[in-house]
Amino acid sequence: MFRIVEESKVLDVNSPYSYLMWSKFFSNTSIVAETEDGEIIGFVSGFIQPEAPDTFFVWQVAVDSTYRGNGLATKLIHRILSQLKETEDVKYLEATVTPSNIPSSSLFRGMAKKYRANCAIFDCFTEEQFPTDDHEKELTYRIGPIQ
């Protein structure tokens, strides 16, 4: 997971430890895609929002560059949502995306179309809220209700 995020050059890279912890403690709301020989080629990490138990928040989604453009990210998110529907009352999908991250923007707009749901986009974090000068603002994509 760490390698894919680092190679993306777009996503915020967290520590390797954080990805191990995420995989262990949020395994019911995260998923990886692997090749037949066990190489991780994509993943989605997320959680059910404590303040909004009907909302699944996608923390990060990434696909190895070799496997992009085949709908893998969409399939992974769909699989998580399908699994969550069995145990949770998830009606909304949320994620934050920087304005320049066109692939992620397209992914979440596409998810809204797939589920025939609304896609509201609004400000989440401003540039000034980040500790460095090189981080764009983050927009929240809220998709739903999902049937």
Image (cartoon, grey):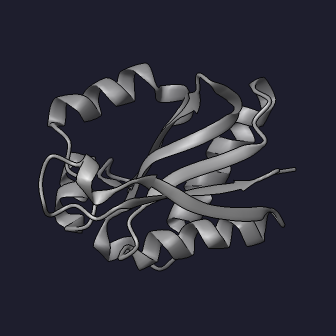
Task: Specify whether 14 is left or right of 104.
Answer: left
Residue 53 spot, x, y in % from top left: 69, 26
Task: Specify whether 101 is left or right of 44.
Answer: left
Residue drawn at x 75%, y 26% as measured from the top left:
88
Residue 91 spot, x, y in % from top left: 78, 42
Q: Is residue 85 visible?
A: yes
Task: Specify whether 90 is left or right of 72.
Answer: right
Residue 78 spot, x, y in % from top left: 67, 53
Q: Nearer the viewer, residue 123 or 69?
A: 123
Task: Specify whether 18 is left or right of 31.
Answer: left
Q: Nearer the viewer, residue 82 or 109?
A: 109
* Relative vertical location of residue 33 with respect to residue 65 in this rendering, above or below: above
Q: Is residue 33 visible?
A: no
Residue drawn at x 56%, y 53% as measured from the top left:
76
Residue drawn at x 52%, y 52% as measured from the top left:
95
* Relative vertical location of residue 130 with respect to residue 97 in this rendering, above or below: above
Residue drawn at x 37%, y 59% as measured from the top left:
62
The residue at the far right in this view is 147
Number of marks present in the image shown? 0
* Relative vertical location of residue 136 with respect to residue 15 in this rendering, above or below: below
